[in-house]
Every structure is written in structure tokens, then in C-alpha cells.
Amino acid sequence: MDLSRFDKSNENQIKNNYLTWLFVYMGIALTLSLILPFPISLGVLLLLLFLLNIVRTEIALRKAGIGGIKGLYKSSSSLGFHRGIGNGLVYTPLKFYCMNCGHEHRKTACPKCGSKAVRVG
């Protein structure tokens, strides 16, 4: 399979997608400016364009397999998370082990003996 041909078709598809959304935005802007008076049309247009960008981002992230905007923010924090079943992330809190008595806890100081000498496990 010729890779350069694949790259060109993918590039053309991306350009067509951008052009499609550009015409959608321009059509919405023209329609709103003709229907509503100026100050109202500007406010409605800005709000509508903001919402359309959220929808576009959601669609693009779902196609990429991230799971939308919520999935993007779930995967952005790596501290305390590990891969669960499927694509989901499961939160696992840090566990502390007392260096003095060996007690497992979730605080900086051991609740059993009060020692602050702990190790993270």
C-alpha cells in the first residue's frame, strides 16, 4: 500500500472537514445577523459558536477513542489512577505504611502509634 496516497487522502479529508465547519459557522453567522438586530445577534452568535465548539470537541474526542470531554479530564490526572477494566480509569488512593509498627493507613501520621515515619506503598 502506498503510504503517500493514504497521507494525501487523510489530508484532503481534514481540509474538507475544516471547510465544512467554516461554511457552517459562516451560514449561522449570516442567518443570525439577518434575523436578529445587532447587539442581540452578536451575543447569540458568540454563545452559539462557543456551544458548537464544545460539540465539535466532543465528537472529535469520541472518534479518537478518548471518550469525550469527560474522558479527557479523567485521563489527565495520573496521580492515584491506574487502568481498570476496559478503557476506564480507576482511582486508587495512596496507602501509607508505618515504619515503626507496620500499620497500613491513609494519613501522614500513624493513627496507631503516632509515628510520622511512613512509607508510601
Image (cartoon, rainbow, N blue to C red):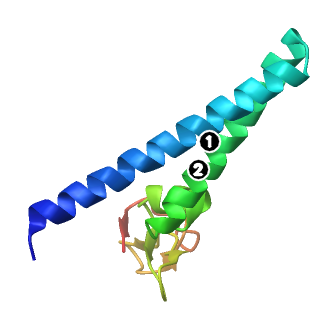
The one nearer the camera, 10 or 118, is 10
Q: Circle 1 is placed at which residue position?
A: 53
**Badge 1 vs badge 2, beta-carbon distance below 8 Å:** yes
Task: Report x, y in % for residue 23.
Answer: 58, 36
Q: Is residue 46 above or below residue 114?
A: above
Is 39 placed above or below 80 here?
above
Image height of 34 relative to 115, above or below: above
Type of amino acid under label 2: Arg
Residue that appears at 73% across and 33% down: 28
Q: Name the residue under label 2.
A: 56
**Of helix, strand and loop, which one carries label 1?**
helix
Query: Can residue 19 be seen in this snapshot?
Result: yes
Tell me if 109 is positioned left or right of 45 in this view: left
Q: Which of 47 and 38 is in front in this view?
A: 38
The answer to whether one can see residue 108 in this image is no
Cα distance in 3D space between marks 1 and 2: 5 Å
Q: Residue 81 vs residue 40: left or right?
A: left
Q: What is the crowding at mark 1: few (fewer than 14 residues within 10 Å), some, or many (at least 20)?
A: few
Does residue 54 appear to the left or right of 7 in the view shown?
A: right
Q: Residues within 10 Å of mark 2 (few under 14, many from 20)?
A: few
Q: Quadrant of the C terminus?
A: bottom left
Image spot of residue 75 (x, y percent): 47, 62
